[in-house]
Image (cartoon, helix red, strand yellow):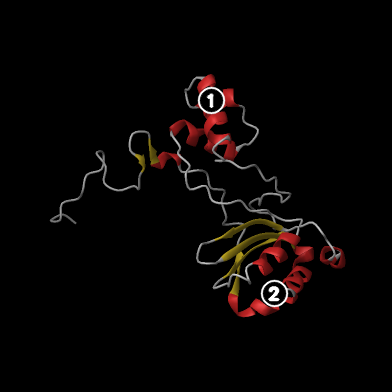
Amino acid sequence: MDWHKIDGTAQEAGVTSFSVNRDSKVDEVDLKILRYLGEDPTSGLAKIGKEINANPRTVRYHHTEHVVKGNLMLGNRIRWVVPFREGATSQIMQLIFCFKGLGQDEIATPRKLFNKLPFTWLEAGTEDRRYYAFLDIPIAHFHDTMKYIEANSETLRNKYEMTMLDPSRTKYLSLPDHMFDKNLGWRLFGLTDDVKETPRNQP
C-alpha cells in the first residue's frame, strides 16, 4: 500500500453517498424485487416473477417504474473480500468508526478521510450529525491503516470510537419483506389473528 499515493489522490477511491428519498412508496411486488436483487443482483426479472408467482410483465413494470425510477435501489457494490468460512482463519479486520457530535464544518474531515481509503465499503450519516464508516481491512495492512486514520483525524480524536466486528458472528441480512402486508403496509410483529394472548392467570 502506497500511503503517499493515497494522500495525493485527486479522486476519492471509496464510497459515495446519496440523499435520502423520503417520498418512496412501495408495494409488495417492489419489495420482492428488492429482496431477490439484494440477495443476488444477477437474478433475472422473469426468474423473480416465477419465484413470487407473478406475471413477468408485471415484475418488469414494477422494476422499471417503481424500483428504478423511484431510486429504491441505487446500485450494487461488489466487495473483494472473501466471505468468512467456518473453521478458516479470517484474513480481514472488520471495523466500524462512529463520529458523534460533529459540527457543520467538521463532517467533511472524516468523509474525505474514509472515502480515500480503498478498504471503506459503506458510509452513513444521521440528521444529528453522526457519521459511520464501515471497513474491511486486510490483516497485512491493518496497522498501517490505523496509523493513517489516527494521523488524519487528530482534530476529532475525542469525537469518534472504533468497534471491531467478529467475522465469524456476522451475517448477511435480507430485506424483511415478511413484515410488509399488501393491505396494511409495514407492520411490527405483535398480536395478530393467529397469535393468542396468554391469560394473566396462567404462567
Which sits in the foreground, 54 or 113? 113
> Which quarter of the picture shows residue 165?
bottom right
Q: Residue 100, relative to residue 174: is it above or below?
A: below
Q: Is residue 126 left or right of residue 162?
A: left
- Disc 1/disc 2 C-alpha distance (Å): 47 Å
SS for dot 2: loop
Q: Quadrant of residue 145?
A: bottom right
Say left or right for 119 vs 25. Answer: right
Task: Determine the residue positioned at 63% across, 71% down.
Answer: 105
Q: Nearer the viewer, residue 66 or 89?
A: 66
* Figure check: 55 above or below 173: above
> Tag 1, which secondary structure?
helix
Near-viewer residue (91 or 193): 193
- Three-letter code, disc 2: Ser
Name the residue carrying label 1: 61
**Is residue 81 rendered to the left or right of residue 59?**
right
Mark before the other along the chain sequence, 1 or 2: 1
Q: Which disc, if any, is residue 153?
A: 2
